[in-house]
Image (cartoon, rainbow, N blue to C red):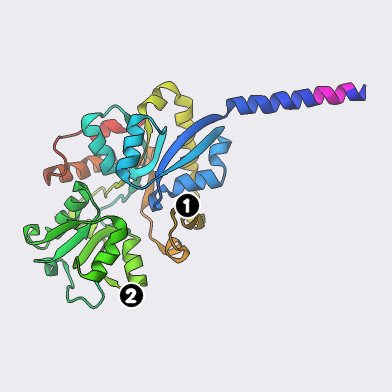
Amino acid sequence: MKKVLAAVIMIFLLAAVTACQKREEAVKIGHLQIVMSLPTYVAFEKGFFTEQGLKVELVPFNSGTDVIDALMAGRIDANCGSSSTGHWFAAQNAPDRFKIFLMYGTTTQKDDNTFVVVVKKDSPIKDLKGLEGKKVGTFPGATSVSLARLAVATQVDPKNVVFTEIAPPNLVPALASGQIDAFFTPEPFGMIAISQGIGEYMMKSPLSLLNLEGGVPGGAFSFTADLVANRPEVAKKIKAAIDKAVDYINEVRPFLAKHTGLPEPVAMAIPFDKWIKLEECNKAASQAYFDLLHKDGAYPQLLDTTALYYE
């Protein structure tokens, strides 16, 4: 009798395990190996995806263009995350291919914890006016150049400044060699230049000059529209896991060093902006940011960015 009972229990347990395995949904999540993606690493490392019954494969990408292309082509189910500006470029041609469910950035005009303007150590350039006639490095892309130009325009005619697009790994070497006189970028590049004895901060928080009262929502996390339409419960579970991870952000800085390759001292000190849950998102602020960049020529077409969110 005991043997029969044990066999029944074993069969029950095997059936339960099999049922759990069947319920587990496979998901591919693309990400850039940067600070913005931290909630993705938290959800992965602390088991929040597993709690939701998701079997997640993290797929790293080296550029925002690559991860957005993969999202639009359906090679990944979610992008967690990359720039909001890259999403807007994609939406110019196909606004119905993705839905945004989390933002990363600032929420007031005064906030800007990540962007910096860095000059060479002991440079005579002390303010934005000093950039007149100089070469300023930025990330590649029209929006990066527009942001730098718009900030500079508050103090000096940007036509008198030469903006040079440089791949992120080459920014600090370009400053060291004199190829550029300054660079305008998010961290950690300022921190790296300073730690190497190459640069110094000429200005922190330059985006605060742009008069965007609702802040600058610079990053976005998104699903494919196909996932939302055909696997709606999976979309909800991804959002739930990431949202839970946002609540743990301040406890998990070591995951940055593990997943991004940043030196641990940089990972532990790098400033964060805010991860903004959909329920707290100021959609009008995103639209104002887009409109500013559109006016500067970064985008050829007008776009209703408020229609791009997951509901």
In the rendered structure, which amino acid carries the disc numbered 1? His
Q: Residue 197: which disc?
A: 2
Residue at the limit of the structure toward the right, as seen here: 1
Q: CA distance from mark 1 to mark 2?
A: 26 Å
Mark 1 = which residue? 259
Q: Quadrant of residue 228?
A: top left
Q: Is residue 263 above or below residue 91?
A: below
How crowded pointer 1 is (Cα within 10 Å; few <14, some 14-19, many 20+) is rated as some
Could you say where residue 261 lies in the image, as x and y percent from the top left? Answer: 44, 57
Does the magenta run of residues contain 16?
no
Name the secondary structure under disc 2: loop
Could you tell me which residue is drawn at 35 percent across and 35 percent down? 70
Say how many tags the image has. Answer: 2
How crowded pointer 2 is (Cα within 10 Å; few <14, some 14-19, many 20+) is rated as few
Nearer to us in this view, 169 or 184: 169
Could you tell me which residue is drawn at 80 percent across and 25 percent down? 9
Q: Are marks 1 and 2 in contact (CB under 8 Å)?
A: no
Could you tell me which residue is drawn at 86 percent across and 23 percent down? 5
In the rendered structure, which amino acid carries the disc numbered 2? Gly
Could you say where residue 127 lies in the image, as x and y percent from the top left? Answer: 17, 69
The quadrant the C terminus occupies is top left
**Magenta residues?**
4-9
The quadrant the N terminus occupies is top right
- In the rendered view, does 186 fall on the left or right side of 159? right
**Residue 123 seen from this side:** yes
- In the rendered view, does 88 fall on the left or right side of 79? left
Name the secondary structure under disc 1: helix
Nearer to us in this view, 83 or 246: 83
Could you say where residue 99 lies in the image, as x and y percent from the top left? Answer: 34, 32
N-terminal of the pair, mark 1 or mark 2, is: 2
